[in-house]
Amino acid sequence: MSHISVEPMADKVFGAVVTDVHLATITDEAFAEIKAAFLRYGFLVFPGQFLSEQDNIRFGERFGKLEFGGVPMANVHRNDDGSFGDVIAIDSQRMRTNVGNEAWHTDSTYMPASSKCAMLSAVVVPDEGGETELADMRAGYAALDQATKDKIADLSAYHSTQYSQANDVGDFPPTDKNSIYHGEAYLRPLVKVHPETGVKNLFIGRHAFGIPGLTREESRALLRSLLEFVVSEPQRTYLHRWQPGDTLIWDNRALLHRARPYDYNQPRYLIGTRVAGDPASELAYYPHDPAAQAGREALAAELAVLEQEVGDRKYHATSAG
C-alpha cells in the first residue's frame, strides 16, 4: 500500500504538495494516487526530486503522449559536463519567447490540439525572481455572475502565439510552418468542460484574441476583464518559488500559468516536459481543414493592426536578429 502524503495548499482553492514519493521509481499504485490528486487539485509540487531528463520523460509519459520531453527551458546552454555556458542574449528569439511567457497563458492553444498538462523540474534558479505562477480557471468561472456566464456561454476566441508575442512584448517572429510561429490561429470556446472531471472552466490567456461576433474593442475588453477577474482573488493564484530539485506539474486544461521576471544575467535552467492533449477533447482543427482559413485571415488582420500599436512594447515591433 502506498504512503504518499498529499497536503493541500494553505489558503488556496487549488494545488497540493506531494511528499514521501520518488517520481523516478514510482509504482503504478502510487501513480494512480498522484493522478487522482492532479485532477482534484489542478497542480502538484514535488520537492526534492532532482529528476534527470529521462526521469522527466518517463514520468510525463504516464500522463499520455508527449509533445516534447526533457528539454531545457532556460536562458543558458548546458555543457556535456553539466556546467553552464554564457547566458543567451535577451534579443534572441529564444529569450523573446521566454519573456513573452511572463504573461498568463495555457500551453499549446496555438496548436491544433492544445496540451493536456506540463511539467517543470528545477536545476539552477536565480537568486530571486524567476518563479512560476499559476491561476485556477475553474474557480474563476465558478465565481462569475450568471449574466457573464450567459454572455460567454457560446463565445469562442482565436489562439495564436504570433498574436501574443506581438501584443505582449512587440515581437514579430518570422512565420515558419515548422515552428510555433506558423501563421495559423485556432478557434476555441471561452468556456471549457474538463474532459476527465466534467467541471467547467474559462479557457483564456495571452494567446486568445478576436472573438467572432464582437468588435475588436469588445473582444479585447472582454478577454482582458475575464483574465483580470480570474487572477484578482489571491485564493485563485499560487506563486512557486523554485528550489533546485523541485518538480511542478499542472493541468493545462484548467489552469493558467506564467513565468516571473528575474535578472536575465543569472542562469535559470528548468527541464520542461509537455503532454499532448487528447484529440477527442483538445483538437480545434488541422491546417488543412476548411475552418483553418478563417483563423489565418483573423490573425493576419490582427497583426497588421498591432504593428501600428506596439512600438512602445519591450521589443518595439521588431523581429529578432
Image (cartoon, helix red, strand yellow):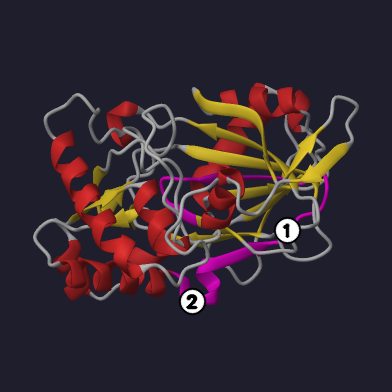
Q: Is residue 79 left or right of residue 54?
A: right
Q: Is residue 100 left or right of residue 137?
A: right
Marking on residue 43: none
Marking on residue 233: 2
In the structure shown, which secondary structural element does the residue marked by tag 2 occupy? loop
Q: Nearer the viewer, residue 66 or 13?
A: 66
Relative to residue 67, is residue 76 depicted above or below? below
Q: Nearer the viewer, residue 164 or 43?
A: 164
Residue 246 in the magenta stretch? The answer is: yes
- Which one is earlier in the sequence, the residue at label 1 or at label 2? 2
Q: Quadrant of the N terminus?
A: top right
Picture quadrant of residue 277: top left
Q: Nearer the viewer, residue 196 or 173?
A: 173
In the structure shown, which secondary structural element does the residue marked by tag 1 occupy? loop
Which region of the structure is painted magenta? Answer: 231-256
Q: Amino acid at mark 2?
A: Glu
Relative to residue 54, is residue 3 depicted above or below? below
Closer to us: mark 1 or mark 2?
1
What residue is drawn where x is 71% and y is 46%?
A: 88
Q: Quadrant of the C terminus?
A: top right
**Residue 26 visible somewhere in the drawing:** no
C-alpha gap between disc 1 and disc 2:
29 Å
Q: Amino acid at mark 1?
A: Tyr
Most extreme residue toward the left, as rendered? 213
Q: Which residue is mark 1?
A: 264
